[in-house]
Amino acid sequence: MRKQRIKARFATKTGNKRSGGAARKKQKYSGRKKGTKAYVLIAPVTVDEAAQEKGKPVRDDRETVHRIGENAHGPLLSVIIPAMNEQRTIAAVVHECLRICRDAEVLVIVNGSTDATASEAKRAGARVIQYAEALGHDGGRRAGAAAARGQILLFTDADIKVPAEHLAPFVQAVLKGVDVALNDYNGPVTRNPVHPVVEAKHMLNSLLCRSDLGGASMTAVPHAISRRALEIIETSSLEIPPLAHAKAIVGGLRVQAVHHVPVGRLNAVRSKKRSKADLLSQLVQQDHLEAIRWITDTRGARGGFPDLQRVRSLTI
């Protein structure tokens, strides 16, 4: 198995006892903190090699294995990053994505930008796909997936620097047979009232008989999907993440929440800048309604749930 030693840093416990006040202080979500050590970041090139490394027989009971890494014409991993006017953060985001594994391409879908996002991304080592006009919310995901060559597609945002150590688990989950590897993020469920987008994510999972997922959703980043999942979900559905999420589950794909990244806290600054109308939240809610409509169109008017002993014809 190919390995790549990377000088990454992550928090570790020290032998010194911290004072009670210091221990309660929140630390920034960063790859560089006090009390660090070298970290070997490994992304197996193939599922076969990953299984052999552990001394276990290769899984052949699912198509999910689907010969990941044997595509001679493309990389193992494609990281897709939609970006609009993100020149301040894009280079750092690209650098972290390039650290995930050696056999990877990073695609930055620059759309509607009026700043130096494209040049900064290219300088950082990304493959830039540029559109003069804005593609709309999540339109960059669709465009990036259509251009991606990798066997695994990892989606993240241009304004959130997530350390490579917290991106790699999504890739590794797909290598182990997961089709859709979700961020294990439920949202601020303890707030009163609960944000309507958080409610919508939980509700959709409940309707899909996947309450175990909580609020985990393809709406949130980071998340990764296999090439097989892309074929079943269809590229066009990616710009409506709740619809893609519903298609994945109804299509029988292996969908799991695999790793927690607190994107709500990481993106708190941008959240505070939103207007009172919060048009983005309204858009996401409408996306969930579109997913529900697809479920009822596919499974029937009751979404696959029974009507028990009701004889509706007799009550007319």
Image (cartoon, helix red, strand yellow):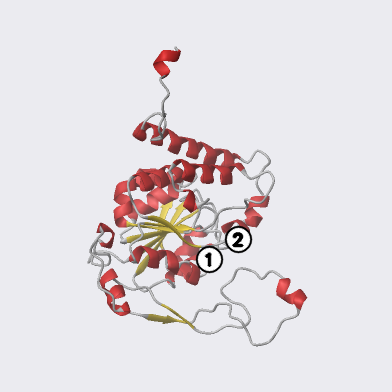
* Percent position of residue 303, x then y: 41, 34
Q: Is residue 259 above or below residue 245?
A: below
In this rendered view, identify the residue nearer to me: 285 or 123.
Answer: 285
Image quarter in which the N terminus is found: bottom left
Amino acid at circle 2: Leu
- Kindly state the secondary structure of the residue where label 1 is placed: loop
Instruction: Tell which circle, 2 or 1, labels the residue nearer the N-terminal end.
Output: 1
Q: Residue furthest front?
A: 309
* Percent position of residue 279, x then y: 59, 39
What is the C-alpha distance between the residues marked 2 and 1? Answer: 9 Å
Picture mark count: 2
In this rendered view, identify the residue nearer to me: 247 or 268.
Answer: 247
Q: Is residue 11 above or below residue 207?
A: below
Q: Can residue 136 be seen in this view?
A: no
Q: What residue do we see at 50% from left, 48% from top?
A: 112
Amino acid at circle 1: Val
* Cβ atoms under marks 2 and 1 closer than 8 Å: yes
Q: Mark 2 points at which residue?
A: 266
* Disc 1: CA contacts within 10 A as few (<14), some (14-19) or many (>=20): many
Image quarter in which the C terminus is found: top left
* Percent position of residue 250, x then y: 36, 44
Q: What residue do we see at 60% from left, 60% from top?
A: 266
Q: Is residue 182 above or below residue 201?
A: below
* Disc 2: CA contacts within 10 A as few (<14), some (14-19) or many (>=20): some
Q: Name the residue under label 1.
A: 162
Q: Is residue 296 left or right of residue 66?
A: right
> In which image quadrant can residue 87 be found?
bottom right
